[in-house]
Image (cartoon, rainbow, N blue to C red):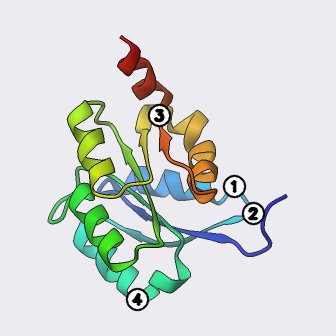
Amino acid sequence: MPNKCPYRVVVADDHAVFRHNLKRILRERSDLEVAGEAGDGVELLAILCLIAPAAHMAIVDIAMPHIGGIEATAAIKRTYPGMKVLILSMHREKQYVHEAMSAGADGYLLKEDADADLFPAIEKIRGGGVYLSPLLNEMERV
């Protein structure tokens, strides 16, 4: 049963169309609320400075101008250790996954998996777990 208080999410991606579609998808769930959005890491950190106590999770792209997602994740975890971070990226390379998780990310979701796995990823992280895209798990077995 969903919590009565909405789970507040901030979305950060430098592609405005992708960000808009992601917000639209997130709004399909009544227990989720988009608390803010950013087009780069600098803007993300500035928004969190204003709303951090009211935000529960940041969904962050890796490849953003000014401050990338990995650096932004590390800054978020230093400043707001209780905030969850889900990396949402097109990058499949193990190096990116390792760097993101080392920076403190709570999950790594490939954009190509987002249609089916966005909500399961959010729920697993929200519940205290760590989430990795199924395609990344398949690559580990190869």
Residue 50: which disc? Answer: 4
Q: Which residue is at 23% across, 73% downward? A: 42
Q: Position of residue 20 (x, y in %)?
A: 47, 57
What is the residue that sits farthest to the left in this orientation? 66
Q: Which residue is at 40% across, 14% downward? A: 141
Q: Nearer the viewer, residue 9 or 130?
A: 130
Left or right of 50? Residue 23 is: right
Q: Give yes or no for contact between labels 4 and 2 (Cβ–Cβ under 8 Å).
A: no
Report which residue position mark 3 lands on: 133
Amino acid under disc 2: Ser
SS type, badge 3: loop
Q: Give yes or no for contact between labels 3 and 1 (Cβ–Cβ under 8 Å).
A: no
Report which residue position mark 2 lands on: 30
Q: Which residue is at 21% across, 62% downward? A: 71
Amino acid under disc 3: Ser
Q: Give yes or no for contact between labels 2 and 3 (Cβ–Cβ under 8 Å).
A: no
Residue 28: which disc? Answer: 1
